[in-house]
Image: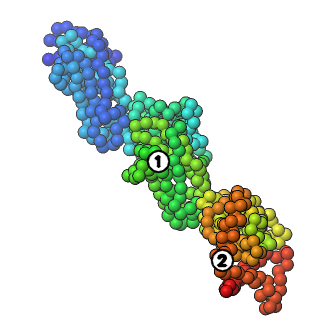
């Protein structure tokens, strides 16, 4: 039987009947590969295949720099290949493998090296995209892989392409973390850009960490944009649980959510399409200040790499971190139809800015920088109008500090404007959605609506200013240097017979 020997230089020779020696390398070299792939999780099986010629009588497998066979195997029918199985991948199994075959003509060359990697030996690193995972077609992006462990190297892999594996030495940070920056691109929508990264040490280059969470780059296309909304409105309160919904009349297979400035994407499969609509829910979990910001969503298909155009932005505000400000109307909450009014939002908290919102309008409405008063009072003045009786004018305001831009105060008490009719008497306005300022309306239609309301009006309201009540009780009026008072009004209903 043929036996393999080697000289001191490591060159293999085949002894045949102890009479002739044929130098190794005179036959074509075989090919070798691993199934399910060369990157194997710790403890899972792997099969190494070696393919030669139909005349092969035996196959051998080398590991590392060894000059002797690590394992030998008889060929499978018709003799052109053999398989070598590892039932449970362990750290010592990681390394470089080559195979050869023996035939009546001698020993083949060794195959090109096969690198087997074992993963799961260390905790996973994190992977993020700079500046964003949403990338314009034809542009490039930087992927950052980092970890708290002192890895010497990081490896970036692309899903579906085992040939794509890129290793970089790590860059130690003052914080003690290590990271590597991988430039990727230009990206196009013709393929999926889904990545993971691993960390390893220089003395064990084939023993890797657990994989990072997957990161997919999103290349927007020209499909029809979906809609993004929050069922509870754009203002959320710290500690609550909230969900965003992305939906479209195009039946997409998947949706992705991205927060402006974020380094990753939140993806979700669609719910069962109903009435030609596809939708997906994105639970935000327990709301905190980090959830504040601007969001967009995208629709896509499982069999395509292209995504839709982005939805219109949805701005999320997180409130409940500071004491509520006060909100008042200047000169009065009773406003003549078609007139304007100034809403004053103020607080002793010395907020840097204020936000005014209108009931029934889910858009975040109007933000102004505050103006400090000599007394330390901070305030902002919001001009509102022209107001009409065809809508409900109910407002709240919030305060915010510049150093914590995602944290807003509790809402002020609600303030409702009352719109006087053509006769000059104040009346309660009907409900209805509207925008805060710059209403566009038709004068003739508005007058007709007001006339109809006057006919059906059976109650009028008489305002009694709270200041008169103060005077009756002897309470002194506040000075201009003190906190501007919130002056609620008391209304009495007079039946008209």
Left or right for 41, reference 423: left
Up/down of 244 relative to 226, above or below: below
Say which quadrant the N terminus sits in. Answer: top left
Residue 93, horizontal then vertical, whole percent: 32, 36
Q: Residue at x 29, y 41 (%)?
A: 44
Say which of 52 and 240 sits in front. Answer: 240
Q: Residue at x 79, y 91 (%)?
A: 473
Can residue 177 be seen here? The reply is: no
Callout count: 2
Tag 1, which secondary structure?
Answer: loop
**Quarter assignment of residue 348:** bottom right
Up/down of 13 relative to 71, above or below: above
Left or right for 419, reference 185: right
In the picture of the structure, the residue carrying the numbered disc 1 is 249
**Quarter assignment of residue 65:** top left
Q: Which of pointers 2 and 1 lies earlier in the amino acid sequence? A: 1
Q: Residue at x 38, y 52 (%)?
A: 272
Q: How was the colour assigned to the protein in this rendering?
A: rainbow
Say which quadrant the C terminus sits in. Answer: bottom right
Can residue 153 be seen here? The reply is: yes
Residue reaching furthest top?
20
The crowding category of the residue bearing disc 1, from other C-alpha atoms within 10 Å (few below 14, some 14 to 19, many at least 20), is some
In the picture of the structure, the residue carrying the numbered disc 2 is 457
Q: Residue at x 71, y 83 (%)?
A: 490
Cα distance in 3D space between marks 2 and 1: 43 Å
Up/down of 395 relative to 220, above or below: below
């Amino acid at each position: 039987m043929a036996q393999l020997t080697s000289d001191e230089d490591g060159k293999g020779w085949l002894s045949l009947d102890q009479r002739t020696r044929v130098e190794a390398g005179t036959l074509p070299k075989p090919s070798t590969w691993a199934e399910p792939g060369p990157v194997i999780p710790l403890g899972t099986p792997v099969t190494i295949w070696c393919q030669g010629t139909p005349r092969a009588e035996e196959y051998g497998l080398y590991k590392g720099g060894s000059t002797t066979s690590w394992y030998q195997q008889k060929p499978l029918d018709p003799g052109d290949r053999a398989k070598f199985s590892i039932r449970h991948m362990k750290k010592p199994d990681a390394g470089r493998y080559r195979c050869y075959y023996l035939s009546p003509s001698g020993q083949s060359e060794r195959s090109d090296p096969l690198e087997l990697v074992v993963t799961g030996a260390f905790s996973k690193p994190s992977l993020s995209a700079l500046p964003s995972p949403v990338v314009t077609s034809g542009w490039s992006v930087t992927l950052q892989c980092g970890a708290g462990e002192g890895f010497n190297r990081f490896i970036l892999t692309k899903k579906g392409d085992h040939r794509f594996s890129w290793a970089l030495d790590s860059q130690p940070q003052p914080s003690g973390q290590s990271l590597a920056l991988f430039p990727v691109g230009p990206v196009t929508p013709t393929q999926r850009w889904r990545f993971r990264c691993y960390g390893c040490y220089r003395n064990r280059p084939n023993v890797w960490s657990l994989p990072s969470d997957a990161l997919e780059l999103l290349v927007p296309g020209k499909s029809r944009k979906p809609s993004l909304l929050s069922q509870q409105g754009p203002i959320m309160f710290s500690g609550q649980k909230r969900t965003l919904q992305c939906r479209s009349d195009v039946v997409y297979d998947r949706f992705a959510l991205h927060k402006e400035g974020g380094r990753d994407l939140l993806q979700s499969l669609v719910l069962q399409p109903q009435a030609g609509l596809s939708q997906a829910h994105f639970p935000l979990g327990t709301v905190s200040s980090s959830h504040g910001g601007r969001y967009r969503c995208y629709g896509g298909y499982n069999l395509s790499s292209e995504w839709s155009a982005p939805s219109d932005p949805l701005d999320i505000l997180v409130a409940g971190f500071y004491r509520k400000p006060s909100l008042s109307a200047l000169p009065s909450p009773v406003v003549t139809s078609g007139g304007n009014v100034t809403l004053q939002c103020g607080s002793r908290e010395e907020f840097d800015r204020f936000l005014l919102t209108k009931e029934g309008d889910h858009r975040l409405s109007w933000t102004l920088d505050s103006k400090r008063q000599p007394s330390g009072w901070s305030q902002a003045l919001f001009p509102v109008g022209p107001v009409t009786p065809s809508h409900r004018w109910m407002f709240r305001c919030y305060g915010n500090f510049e150093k914590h831009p995602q944290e807003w105060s509790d809402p002020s008490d609600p303030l409702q404007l009352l719109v006087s009719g053509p006769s000059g008497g104040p009346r309660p306005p009907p409900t209805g959605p509207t925008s805060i300022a710059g209403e566009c309306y038709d004068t003739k239609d508005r007058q007709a609506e007001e006339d109809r309301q006057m006919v059906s009006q059976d109650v009028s309201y008489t305002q009694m200013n709270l200041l008169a009540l103060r005077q009756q009780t002897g309470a002194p009026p506040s000075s201009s240097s003190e906190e501007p008072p919130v002056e609620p009004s008391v209304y009495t209903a007079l039946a008209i017979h």
